[in-house]
Amino acid sequence: MVAQTGSCLCGAVRYRLAEPPKGLGACHCGMCRKFSGGIELGIEVPAGGVVFETDETLRTYTSSDWAERGFCATCGSSLYWRLTAPGPMHGLYAVAAGTLDSLDGLELTQEVYIDHKPAGYALTGDHTRLTEADIMAMVAAAQEGETP
């Protein structure tokens, strides 16, 4: 069973999810690759769906005009990406899947920025694959008040 709790490597930042994760997403954009050191595997969590139980070392970095990334200042663990742009998706998290206490039962449901995927690997299976243009259209629609 997939855990609803997680932490950074050193345990200084701990969190609890309001709902069990429904699927695992993979992002191939350049920022996620640099932030995670490879494919960013994350779980989508709606605004308000993450409760940080301990967060004294939690820091954020504004990585674009519409998003920020959270990390532990002590151990450097990448913890999440969060949408900061206004609109109905404001506050949406992509929590780093590797920070969950267990990934048992969690399956890949989506790949994004597939047009930026390095040629050296491929994720198999039947799941949604979106390009950069697809994602940017979703963000723009969300900023205009539409739900993607």
Image (spheres, helix red, strand yellow):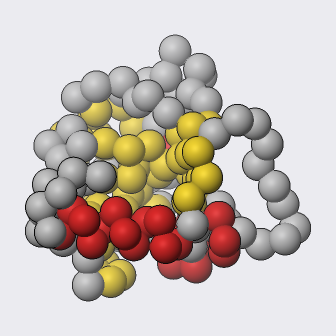
Residue 51 image position (x, y, % from top left): 19, 40
Drawn side of residue 59 relative to residue 71, left or right: left
Q: Nearer the viewer, residue 140 or 15?
A: 140
Q: Is residue 67 above or below residue 103?
A: below
- Name the residue at the top extreme: 1
Drawn side of residue 84 relative to residue 138, left or right: left
Q: Residue at x 47, y 65 (%)?
A: 134
Residue 99 seen anywhere in this rendered image of the structure: no
Image-quadrant location for residue 80? bottom left
Residue 81 image position (x, y, % from top left): 36, 62
Q: Residue at x 52, y 72 (%)?
A: 132
Residue 145 image position (x, y, % from top left): 12, 61
Disc tally is 0
Image-quadrant location for residue 139? bottom left
- Name the residue at the right extreme: 120
Q: Is residue 19 above or below residue 30?
A: above
Residue 136 image position (x, y, % from top left): 39, 72
Q: Nearer the viewer, residue 91 or 4?
A: 91
Residue 51 seen anywhere in this rendered image of the structure: yes
Q: Residue at x 57, y 66 (%)?
A: 131
Q: Is residue 103 above or below residue 67?
A: above
Q: Is residue 34 above or below residue 42?
A: below
Q: Residue at x 84, y 71 (%)?
A: 119
Q: Nearer the viewer, residue 56 or 60?
A: 60
